[in-house]
Image (tube, rainbow, N blue to C red):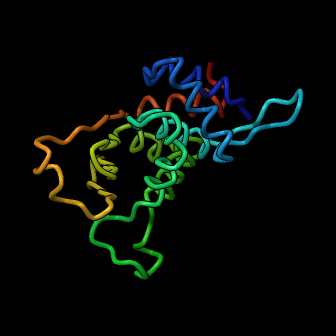
Amino acid sequence: MPSTKQACDALVRRVGYDPGRTKEVARALTEADMLPSGSPGVSPDLSPQHVATLMLGVALDVPLRAVADTVSEYRALRREGVPVGAPASISVTAGEQLDIIAEIAATGSLDARALVAKTTLSVVNNWSELVLTDTIDTRRFSAGEPDRWQAHGHRRAVELNLGAFATVIAELFSGDR
């Protein structure tokens, strides 16, 4: 299992994040118990889901003091149009979907990994919205504010190629260096 430092270095190298921001976000998420902290003299062991949480945290354009709360908020987003109390088969949160993608990138079949590599994650920073776009469909997770962007004039988003994320997961969890 990789350490937080190894995950930060891989995200900086493959996704192109700022090294200082990545390390500070990792620290903020660790202090909020969203990433494991390890113990004295022992570095923490991260899972693919922890790396997905870190990737999301760094993509958010919020002050460091708000990173943990905002990551929790974004991970709790529900798929657009699915009401609260809907059957579990269609009621997946954005966090659960990111965890599934991370697990597929770590242990999935070659075809499943190829589909993850063709997926784009859009992290909208003006309001709470995540959009996953692949060759099959578009999955939009939002907080129910579809017309807010019109009032502010533009939609500000960070687009992440999950092919780079899949490469990070492969490096960290399958020994490909």
The residue lying at 33 percent from left, 61 percent from top is 143
Image quadrant containing the N terminus: top right
Expressed as whole percent of the image width and height from the top left, the position of residue 4 reads 67, 30
For residue 152, above or below residue 96: above
Place residue 176 in its image quadrant.
top right
The residue lying at 34 percent from left, 39 percent from top is 118
Front one among 159 and 151: 151
The residue lying at 56 percent from left, 22 percent from top is 10
The residue lying at 47 percent from left, 33 percent from top is 58
Expressed as whole percent of the image width and height from the top left, the position of residue 136 reads 28, 53
Front one among 83 and 105: 83
For residue 40, above or below residue 31: above
Front one among 47 and 134: 47
Expressed as whole percent of the image width and height from the top left, the position of residue 91 reads 42, 72
Going by the image, does 3 lie left or right of 112?
right
Expressed as whole percent of the image width and height from the top left, the position of residue 162 reads 41, 36
Going by the image, does 163 lie left or right of 9?
left
Figure label count: 0
Going by the image, does 102 lie left or right of 39?
left
Image quadrant containing the C terminus: top right
